[in-house]
Amino acid sequence: MTEEIKVDLELDLKGLLCPLPMVKVSQNIKNIAVGGVIKAIATDPGALADIPSWARTTGNEILKTEKDGKDLIFYVKRLK
Amino acid sequence: MEEKRKEITLIVLSGDMDKLVAAFSIASGAAASDMDVTMFFTFWGFRAIKKAKASTGKSFLAKMFGIIEGGGIGKASPSKYSMAGMGRFMFKKMMKAKGMMTLEDQRKLAIDLGVNMYACQQTMDIMEIPREALIDEVKDVVGVAFMLEHAKNSFTTLFI
């Protein structure tokens, strides 16, 4: 059994195009506590590269990335 | 302790729609990545910071110029396939169909994210553009030394 990730905030970013998915993640991560997790669901394929890059630049962590059909699901942990 | 924020400077000379899309994408992306962003608009880049209905200069040439270069950011045409406004029309249609933000919205997003916008004094002098013709969000009218100071402090400076 896979370990369940506790999600503090879920973001629907479907249909948004670059740079909006990463911008929305960056805006919303300020609304959760350090250590909290955002589950972001995007459909723009660019987000696959963009959100992890954003996380490396800003010092946050991608816990897991999943694909479900066209949905790209990111679990982003706020580290600072 | 807060670590020092990175800074990026964008010099926007172009008023072309495609280049402005790139400039605002980079600016918003950088601001969302916790960077301080300075945009310095000069010459044709003024298209991006002019009000839609901007007053024109006093001299004959400046007035003529104001008519030719009239309109705000929504009047920006692509650098290729401009075709007397057709290119702009087609791009706007395609962008809308894909759910992409208009240039106005991209500028608004950048402003909301805290991107700092400055206008070039030299351009305003030559083209006789008054401060009132620029959007209120332009922080100041500055010269090249101001731009260079920010470029010196930036990890990279882009000329668009």
Image: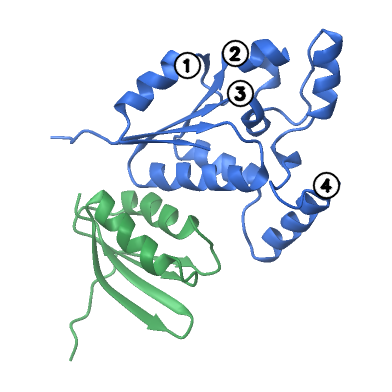
Total number of numbered discs in the rendering = 4
Write down the chain letter for disc 2: B
**Which residue is rendered at x = 26% and y = 35% of the image?**
B5
Q: Earlier in the sequence, mark 1 or mark 4?
A: 4
Q: x, y (%) of residue A30?
A: 32, 49
Q: Are marks 1 and 4 on the same chain?
A: yes
Q: How is the image coloured?
A: by chain
SS under mark 2: helix
Write down the chain letter for disc 1: B
The residue to which callout 4 is attached is B85
Q: Earlier in the sequence, mark 3 or mark 2?
A: 2
Q: Is B112 positioned to the left or the right of B14 in the image?
A: left
**Which residue is rendered at x = 79% and y = 27% of the image?**
B53
Q: x, y (%) of residue B115?
A: 46, 34
Q: Which chain is blue?
A: B
Q: x, y (%) of residue A35?
A: 18, 58
The residue to which callout 3 is attached is B136
Disc number lying in front (3 or 4) = 4
Q: Quadrant of residue B98?
A: bottom right
Write down the chain letter for disc 4: B
